[in-house]
Amino acid sequence: MSDTTQPVVEISGLHKSFGSLQVLRGVDLQVERGQVVCVIGPSGSGKSTLLRCVNLLEEPTSGSVVVNGVELTDPDCDIDAARVRIGMVFQSFNLFAHLSVLENLTVAQRKVLRRSKEQAEEVARRNLARVGLTDKEHAMPAQLSGGQQQRAAIARALSMDPEVMLFDEPTSALDPELVGDVLGVMRQLAEEGMTMLVVTHEMQFAREVADQVVFMDGGGIIEQGDPASVIGAPSHERTRTFLSRVLDPTHHGPSDPAV
Amino acid sequence: MSKRQRARLFRGIQYGILVVALLVLVLAADWDALGRAFFDPAVIANQFPEVMTVALVNTITYTAMGFAFALAFGLVIALMRLSSVGPYRWIATLYIEFFRGLPALLVFLALGVGVGYAFGLNLDRSLSIMLALGLVGGAYIAETIRAGIQAVPKGQVEAARSLGMSPARTMITVVIPQAFRIILPPLTNELILLTKDSSLAFILGSTLAQHELTQFARNALNTDRSLTPIVVAGFCYLMITLPLSYLSRRLERRFGKGARTGPGRE
């Protein structure tokens, strides 16, 4: 169906303002099929907003977003239909609190994709197995650890058979010892060939899994390229400052000038 | 005197006053007269079984009808209040402010008597009661539901929309079920208030078979010349409202904790 040579996500000239605050100032970015792109940068750099513009949770002020060949920024676009193919994973998991894990995974399949109960549950169980939560299908979200909740949320997104997965700081709300479970699932997804756009602070994950790393600051892309060059040998001063703060945080006093 | 000693003395004085007051009450009160006035066995016997089979049943029926209507109507008003269409919001706000500001008795009068005079059209008595309780209760319930809908974390809506659900589908499948869990305790309070407001049905006039608790007590008061019927009616109200209060507290405890997913980002 979709052209395999065309990028899955194509962002051009993206601007976003909240009132007088300009959060994105002209971002261009492409994600090819099967690619993993990690977006890094200091808080307030606009990276989460960029991600949220890709499925139009935030309405861009100007510019265009094309996903799977559909221009989402076209006012006539059926955004609900387009979002089915764009999986989204949030920092705060956002599992439906009133539904069991299995129901979390089946509700949209049934109400949106109109799958039968049997089919939806079969898909859901397959995806729960993928994230290692087979024994938790009857649990309520509040009974799960953060890491389990996030893996269930990933399985929920996967149950819609997305063409691309968006991850918005998926491990930032987790206790340190639970981060590995979630990153492991994400790495496995990447290895299976899933197209992924990931906003993250996990530099090691970006270095090992990403095909491309994008460094953002002040609402724009400062530099991008393969992980070895952006994280290993950044060419831009702002990237170097950010990375040294993240990778070696104890060697900076609070008096360091803000980036 | 140290601070601690002073606190102890002060507490002792408080207990002392209480004990003295109780003693005075016990010794000075004419228990026979009080017993005759409030708990006259003959009068109590007179009340049964009608106070249960007729009056209590009527009170419950009127309240249930009024509450059902108030709930449905309140949901509509709450959704209008949150609508993106300006005029809907204004109408809903106007409605809520208006009906919350009126005594329920006035609404009963308007529907039961006023409508008849103005349009020459006599509303069925049960319908009038349901409408009056529903219109008043709906205004309060609308605000409760609105608060409940707004208390559902934004992330829940974002997750639903990200899965391709339309705004209406999101509201029905994700937001409203969670909002109702949040507002169950205040909603139970509304039900208790409505139970008491059902006593206003007396203004519409009633046959013996239509008496609810208050009207029933009022009638018995005149025939039996005693305070006892009021005590009996009061106990009957408590039979409805105390279990509801208990239920409300239990629900509050149950939904108060652990109902959320993960750290909210509000």
Image: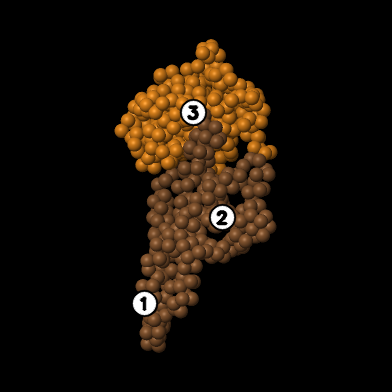
Chain colours: A orange, B brown
Q: Residue at x 55, y 16 (%)?
A: A7
State the residue in front, B135 or A167.
B135
The x and y percentages for residue B202 are 53, 65
Q: Residue at x 43, y 44 (%)?
A: B260
Which quarter of the image is occupied by the N terminus of chain B? bottom left
- Mark 3 burial class by Cα count in 10 Å: few <14, some 14-19, many 20+: some
Residue B64 visible: yes
> Residue A171 appears in which quarter of the rendering?
top left
Which mark, by number, is residue B124?
2
Task: Give the distance between the C-alpha atoms of the residues marked 1 and 2, in whole angstroms.
Answer: 37 Å
The x and y percentages for residue B190 are 50, 57
Q: Comparing marks 3 and 2, which lies closer to the viewer?
A: 2
Q: Are marks 3 and 2 on the same chain?
A: no
Q: Are marks 3 and 1 on the same chain?
A: no
Q: Residue at x 40, y 34 (%)?
A: A103
Q: Secondary structure at mark 1?
A: helix
Proximity of marks 3 and 1: CB atoms separated by less than 8 Å: no
Amino acid type, residue under disc 1 in the picture: Ala
Q: Is residue A42 above or below residue B228?
A: above
Which mark, by number, is residue A112?
3
For mark 3, name the chain.
A
Amino acid type, residue under disc 3 in the picture: Val
Amino acid type, residue under disc 2 in the picture: Asp
The x and y percentages for residue B132 are 57, 57
For mark 2, name the chain.
B
Tally of numbered discs: 3
> Residue B166 appears in which quarter of the rendering?
top right
